[in-house]
Image (tube, rainbow, N blue to C red):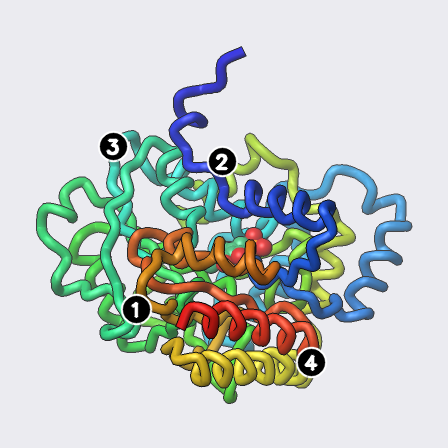
Amino acid sequence: MELSDRLKSLPPYHFAAYRRKLGELRAAGVDIIDLSMGDPDLPTPPEVVERLRVTAGEAVNQHYPEFGGMPALRTAFAAWFERRFGVALDHERELLPLLGSKEGVAHLPLAVLNPGDVALIPDPYYPAYPTAVALAGGTSRMLPVDAAHGWLPDLGAVPAEALKGARMLWLNYPNNPTGAAASHEFFEEAVRFARAHGLLLVHDMAYAEVTFDGYRPPSILEVDGAREVAIEFHSLSKAYNMAGFRVGMAVGNAGIVEGLARLKSNIDTGIFRPIQYAAITAIGLPESWLDERNAIYQGRRDRVLAACGRLGLAAESPRAGLYIWPRIPAGRTSAEFALELLDRAGLAVTPGTNFGAGGEGYLRISLTVPDARLDEALARLETVVAARA
Ligand SMILES: Cc1ncc(COP(=O)(O)O)c(C=O)c1O
């Protein structure tokens, strides 16, 4: 049976194939250290797991859940958003619980784009964006970004020809893979730009709560008038070590939120209620829980940065996120170097080009293993780099 042209035209999802390869190597006895995915290794808070366990045993929660999330979750999310960002949302019209933020990212273009519409995407990017655009029949137009400009798109320099047919602009700060942060002023500029060109701003904030040195990333909805042109994705996966739970939300423009909800009501039937209860418990945890967890990642960040410094691999210190984004040694591509690390040292990292052509010359290293394992990984990295020097 033939698969659709649409499906056949998609690039393979890198991590699906890569995980298979890692599985094969492990089965052959190779001791792989996996710094490739952004899957938190730290445990879900025990009170969150307990809430899931208890509520899963209650018969009322074993039925189909509400399409748009339980009112209790929607009001808890809205209260969290107001506490965290100082922005009051209408929990019925401006907020929608999701089965993880990737689900919302993947479905949004189907609700917004017509075939042939253009989406502007800063490159490097989270690979789900262009895939989602392609599934909706849209075309992605990449906006190159680089370290010299803080990995932010220069909105004043977007060529008029790129704006022809453009309907949306994707943003993601704190950024995966670069670790870059965006300021309130940048978001003001983005809102003005979206208004001027009739674009929907899509801001992915999956790393809002994984932050270092006391940094508090702003929401785009803090900008006056942003809710007229923007939608923002949030996720509990990285925020509360809940990647397996699959829960997040979309907030922002009421019409877009309603459209996404309408689309989803034809596709999924909501989030298992016990997961929603677990989410309510998670977002009610004290700030100190986040501080303690983030201190662990910050220690790992500093270990990796110190090693990169010793090896002459230039890397900026990220203020947020789960990744270090160093330059690779000269003389090979990102893909070649990543393969070399895997073959010669059993070290799994992600080549920068997995995030678009703009990632050439870089590597993404995840901070998702404990210190001792991370030190072993860095020693292996050192061996490979030294052998090539
Ligand atoms: C930038 C970005 N957005 C969204 C996601 C998806 O997160 P989830 O679907 O687990 O909420 C990820 C996961 O790695 C990500 O890096």
Q: Foreground mark, 1 or 4?
A: 1
Q: Is mark 3 within 8 Å of ligand 1?
A: no
Residue 389, image x, y percentages = 40, 73
The kind of residue tagged 3 is: Gly
Nearer-the-camera pick, 328 or 71? 328
Residue hosting label 3: 116
* First in sequence: mark 1 vs mark 4: 1
Q: Foreground mark, 2 or 3?
A: 3
Residue hosting label 4: 289
Would residue 261 appear left or right of 39 to someone viewing this image? left
Residue hosting label 2: 263
* First in sequence: mark 4 vs mark 2: 2
Number of marks in the rendered image? 4
Residue hosting label 1: 151
Q: Foreground mark, 3 or 1?
A: 1
* First in sequence: mark 4 vs mark 3: 3
Q: Is mark 2 within 8 Å of ligand 1?
A: no
Residue 104, image x, y percentages = 50, 47
Quarter of the figure with residue 314: bottom left
Disc 4 to disc 3, C-alpha distance: 46 Å
The kind of residue tagged 1 is: Trp
* First in sequence: mark 1 vs mark 2: 1
Disc 4 to disc 2, C-alpha distance: 36 Å
Return the residue found at the far bottom.
213
Could you tell me which secondary element the residue under label 1 belongs to?
Answer: loop
Residue 233 appears in the figure: no
Q: Are marks 1 and 4 in contact (CB under 8 Å)?
A: no
Could you tell me which secondary element the residue under label 3 belongs to?
Answer: loop
Would residue 80 appear left or right of 355 to someone viewing this image? right
Badge 4: few (under 14), some or many (20 or more) residues near its Cα, within 10 Å?
Answer: few
Disc 3 to disc 1, C-alpha distance: 27 Å
The kind of residue tagged 4 is: Trp
